[in-house]
Amino acid sequence: MGNPNLTYDNQAISVDCTVFGFDGSALRVLLVHRHHTLPSGEETEDLKLPGSLISDCEDLPSAASRVMRELIGVRSIYLKQMEVFSDPQRVRGSELRWINTFYGVSLSRVLTVGFFALVKLDEKLMHYSKRKGGEWAELGHVRRLALDHNKILVTAIDYLIQLFQQEPIAFEFLPRKFTLKQLQKLYETVLDVEIDNRNFRKKILSLEYVLPAGKCEEGVPHKPAQYYFFDRKIYKRENKKILKLNFVYR
Amino acid sequence: MGNPNLTYDNQAISVDCTVFGFDGSALRVLLVHRHHTLPSGEETEDLKLPGSLISDCEDLPSAASRVMRELIGVRSIYLKQMEVFSDPQRVRGSELRWINTFYGVSLSRVLTVGFFALVKLDEKLMHYSKRKGGEWAELGHVRRLALDHNKILVTAIDYLIQLFQQEPIAFEFLPRKFTLKQLQKLYETVLDVEIDNRNFRKKILSLEYVLPAGKCEEGVPHKPAQYYFFDRKIYKRENKKILKLNFVYR
DNA sequence: ACAAAAGTGTTCCTCTTACACCCATGA
DNA sequence: TCATGGGTGTAAGAGGAACACTTTTGT
């Protein structure tokens, strides 16, 4: 520590959010358009993850919330810090110039903290984000993104799959009342597997914190499905009770 | 984005490492002494986690490695980024003055990235760290630390317990050759449970990647124990084979 | 009556848990 | 020979995996 060979220059920190939603059959991620001047001077446009530099007075979660609020409005979303991308070379040249122009600063380096967010995606929200300059791209259709955002996206996808098997984040994607079929389709999509519906239902219904909402689908041309809901209070209580002794990883 | 009300002032980023070791019966964490001037002008000393500001030319993992290298020398250690502590008020007043004096800078805000490290603790390493100004404190005996380092430590402990049940990090604590008893004691210590030795042995020996080293303890006044070792190559191979379909969290 | 999706049970097998005694060594 | 910790087997129960048909609704 206190090494005189090290310098601490004008760095700044940004947040970049990978926001996932489920449209009923595919995962989508929220992207924004970036207007950009190529080294040749030509104007062009590409896509990036939504993000922002953090200001002096806010912490990282606030910065991430602010970015989210601008694109999806005020609504409760699941938001979690993922990891920091700190390669000194991650933003340079024309990318760095873009940031300095956009924010009116003169930084020599920008680190970014990747955030991971989940929202309940519906038609209303999709239109709202579109009006605000966002775009909900299907995961499979995402191509080259600006900066190192493909790397951040890949990290977020890994994180999603990992977390999905450890915590009940599935419910963050679905409306408050959902059918078991919707839930199953979501699991199949995220984990990229096929699941036997009998075993799936058995397992879900054995969880004390997934309860019937007492209502059914209406107007469907087949047997209407029961709605269920996720009771977070019961989850938190039950979850603490179960100190899993299944102590060795598989 | 581009909000003119936000300012991006002279922030800097540091890393703080929570380094865990196992002395055969208790977990220990590496702390360093800090010499510190109180607001009253009085000189005093307290303990903190090892850390450093990051310099312009390095990324976070390099900064964390550098900090580690200074205290434990060059050896392979398990090192992972945990999370960022970004409260704008986390370092201020005399704490901020201490940083500015120590590094010869004039920052108004410091964010820190918590790192999580595991080392194979032995007598030699303990003496080495002590010579370098470090101290291996038993987890249960850690009291008030400088800055917000108690908060970072608590986060790291949660992280350790969590990760311990998901990945074979236990072996990072033990010498290359270890007895099953040592391994069991480690599990019992970290997870704070008692484990039946027959079931534990059965489970561990069923893992393809824990293999007998073909040697035994020597000079012990009881039946000598067999040594085993962890084969990381096999672990990586086998682990990819098992795409766990056990798809719903408990 | 038909199309379409919801909902339901059983068997086999694997993994987890609980539990108590003999064995090899140095002193 | 004794003290010390190392090492072993079995039975009962819980949970996971595989598998096919009946029910309810709208048209």
Image: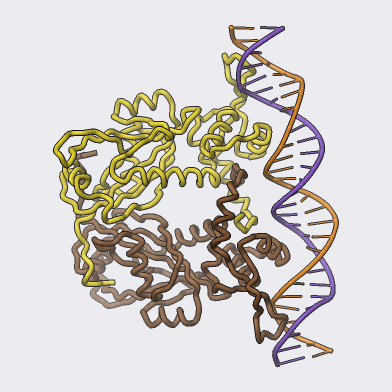
Chain colours: A yellow, B brown, C purple, D orange
Which image quarter: residue A229?
Answer: top right
- Return the residue nearer the eye: B27 or A158: A158
Judging depth in this view, the residue of A6 and B12 nearest the camera is A6
The image quarter in which residue B66 lies = bottom left
Rendered position, B232 above or below B23: above
Q: Residue at x 68, y 63 (%)?
A: B205
- What residue appears at the point 31 percent right and 38 percent down from the top-left corner? A48
Residue B245: percent from left, percent from top:
61, 43
Q: Is residue B11 above or below residue B28?
A: above
Q: Is residue A227 above or below residue C20?
A: above
Tell me the quarter of the image containing the C terminus of chain A. Answer: bottom right
A235 versus C1 height, above or below: below
Q: Looking at the figure, which quarter contains the N terminus of chain A?
A: bottom left
Q: Position of residue A186 (x, y in %)?
A: 53, 33
Residue B37 spot, x, y in % from top left: 26, 74
Left-right relation of C5 to B47: right
Residue that appears at 52% across and 57% down: B163
